[in-house]
Amino acid sequence: MKVRDVIHAAFPVAEYRNRYDKLRKAMEKRNLDAILVTAKENVIYFSGLETVGWDSKHRPVGCILPRDDAHPIMVVAESLASVADVTSWVDDVRLWGGFKRTGIPQDPVIGIADAIKDLGLAKGRIGMEMGYGTRINMSQADFETLKSLLPDVEVVDGAETIWELRMIKSPAEVEVMRRVCQDTCKAYQAAFEAIRGGMSERELAGILLTEMARLTSFRPGFVGIRSGKLKYAMMNVPPFETKRLEPGDLVVVDAGATFRDYWCDMMRMASIGDPDSEARHFFDVDLAAQRAGMAQVKPGAKAGDVCKACLDVIQEAGLREHAPSLERVGHGLGMEVHEPPSLALGSEVEIQPGMILTVEPIFSDLPNYQIGNFAMEQILLVTESGGELLTPFTDELWIAPAG
């Protein structure tokens, strides 16, 4: 096939071709004739397509990646024709819409079904984003229509096949991850130097978001903040506009920039004024647990080993009543903030070189949530010899002015 001359993709064409070659081998192992991807991250990962319209629920995209003839087809709205020309390496781009062009389907689902038929897969076994950590990016009604248009196609879960590739980062992906982690650390430096009593959580978040966008020249990332007794029991909570940082508050900042659609995800802690001895003890135990978990990140280890190492430190330090167990202490990271594998207790998933993992034991004082919420999150690249730290910003408790 002729390879499109891409000039504004995140990576060279060779990167996408290599991903597709690996996907074809993974499909062969699972007896799949093709993979149909519709979700933003998977379409970008395999095709390179870039658009700011991913949040629209009115412009579905489908990319069909066949196993045998190495001829992928992408189906996009006619308004994206020129965008696909300069961001995707896929040269067979089918359009739908019919508002400006004639002879094309008005419905994207019909366009996708026609492309599958043109590939000779009307009776094929096709994987879709149906399993863990994936979503089909079309309405339920559209999905039912697609199946009715392809009555002899066997639709199966393709998530495991997709994650087999995405869990292991290429050298090109690693360099992007280094960059986004570096920029996030710089943003943390600026934000933590500005923390002081009296400022609002939203003001602190604004500094982080501004710096992350400035450093990456990309869209802003994400920020979660939990400070003070109001929020010690909370998780994944946004910064509150009217919540002030008060003397004695412990502050957990969970944030990450995004660059070329790859994410950073790290947590650090600050104290507004000096912490009391009990809060300091809890923090020190959490930090020791986090470092113990990091030491287990190495090829051949099991994901559950990392979680157990963290839990053992917390319980051996006399805090068993506050952390009787841990659900998990980390996850994969890449084009999504949470990716497989999950570093969960008992997980037998083998850690492999090329994985990028977070390690983040989190616990609070139970049952009252009065001392603090304790969390430290680092990012590691798994190498042949162990784990390489990608987030070197200090992991010590940051002491901020009380006012």
Image (cartoon, grey):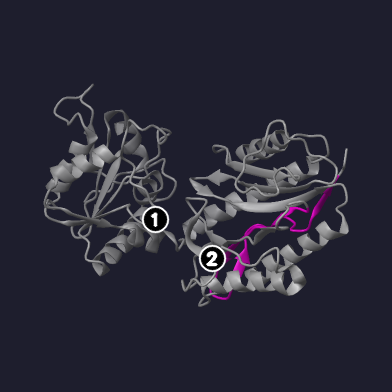
* Quarter of image, res 387: bottom right
Residue drawn at (54%, 56%), measured in percent from left and top? 175
Up the image or down, 15 lies above or below 253; here it is below
Left or right: 6 in relation to 226? left
Q: In this view, does 328 lie above or below 295?
A: above
Residue occupied by mark 2: 343
Residue marked by disc 1: 15
- In depth, the one of 336 and 104 nearer the eye is 336
Q: Is residue 326 visible?
A: yes
In reply to whether residue 396 is colored magenta, the answer given is yes
Horizontal side of residue 42 vs 120, given as left or right: right
The correct choice, above or below, for 178 with respect to 114 in the image is below
Cβ atoms at labels 2 and 1 below 8 Å apart: no
Q: Which residue is drawn at 14% across and 42% down?
A: 149
| For discs 2 and 1, the disc positioned in front in the rendered view | 2
Quadrant housing the C terminus:
top right
The range drawn in magenta is 371-400
Q: What residue type is labelled 2?
A: Leu
